Amino acid sequence: MSSTAIPSELWSDVETLWEYNQPTQEMRPVDVGIGLGSHDLGVATHTADLYNRGLFPLVVFTGGNAPTTVGRFPRGEAVHYREHALTRGVPDSAILLEPNATNTGENIDFTRALLDQRGELDSVRSVMLISRPYQRRRSFAICRKKWPEVEVICSSLPLPLADYVRSIGDADRVINMLVGDTQRIWVYPERGWAIAQDVPDAVHEAYARLVDAGYTSRLLPTEDVEFRPQAR
């Protein structure tokens, strides 16, 4: 049975990575809100809430499936996100679907291509990436690499760590994903997939202790990382 509580001896290290992966940015209106596909329906909830607050006039939900999401969202992440957003008051006319992306880099590339096909790309000067909390720093770095012309703001459902783990229902899954996303902060720039970012010593140390504790299922093998899919 999955645990919804982080072991007390791991709490400090998990919280260090949790806070690092959520850089603070000032929220302001942007041209497009982009809901990044994942296993977490909270992304769609937060995207809808931000739309209803008037922070963007257009939503793109992007995502097909990955091994970690196909069971929950059999028709594809973006399709399920759209359906959920409709129940929260977002009009269908304000939603675009990108149903093929299988990683964050493709989320950005395929969203750009979709907007270009619709003749809207040149008018986009700012975007808001809505993701899982621990994906914010990574998605920002990827977007800045792939789409440097736009201002990028990242947002996620504002939940404390313990509440987020309870909402997912699986502490081990959250910790493994958090460790994997943290590793990608320095691996992706080495592979040309993202811009480089500062990683404090405290983050490296917390990451290393969690790896030593066995939270390795989402790590990229660094010796052949260029041939591995990006994280979902």
Image (spheres, rainbow, N blue to C red):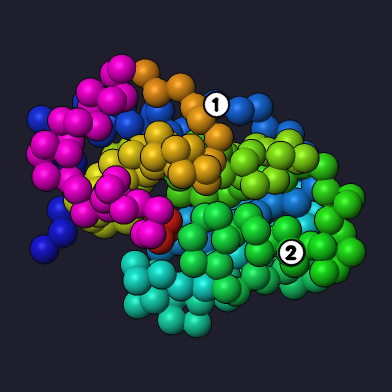
The amino acid at mark 1 is Thr
Q: For the residue labelled by badge 2, is the local secondary structure a helix, a strand or a loop?
A: helix
Question: In this rendering, would 12 be left or right of 128?
Answer: left
- Mark yes or no: residue 160 visible: no
Q: CA distance from mark 1 to mark 2?
A: 29 Å
Residue 105 in the image: x percent, y percent?
A: 55, 55
Does the magenta segment cover residue 205?
A: yes
Give the residue furthest to the bottom: 75
Quadrant of the snapshot with the C terminus: bottom left
Mark 1 surroundings: few (<14), some (14-19) or many (≥20) residues within 10 A: few
Q: Which residue is label 2 attached to?
A: 113
Residue 195 in the image: x percent, y percent?
A: 55, 35
Q: Residue at x 71, y 39 (%)?
A: 148
Q: Residue at x 69, y 52 (%)?
A: 33
Q: Residue at x 15, y 59 (%)?
A: 2
> First in sequence: mark 1 or mark 2?
1
Question: In this rendering, would 181 be left or right of 38?
Answer: left
In the rendered structure, are the residues bearing label 1 and label 2 in contact, judged by CB atoms less than 8 Å apart? no
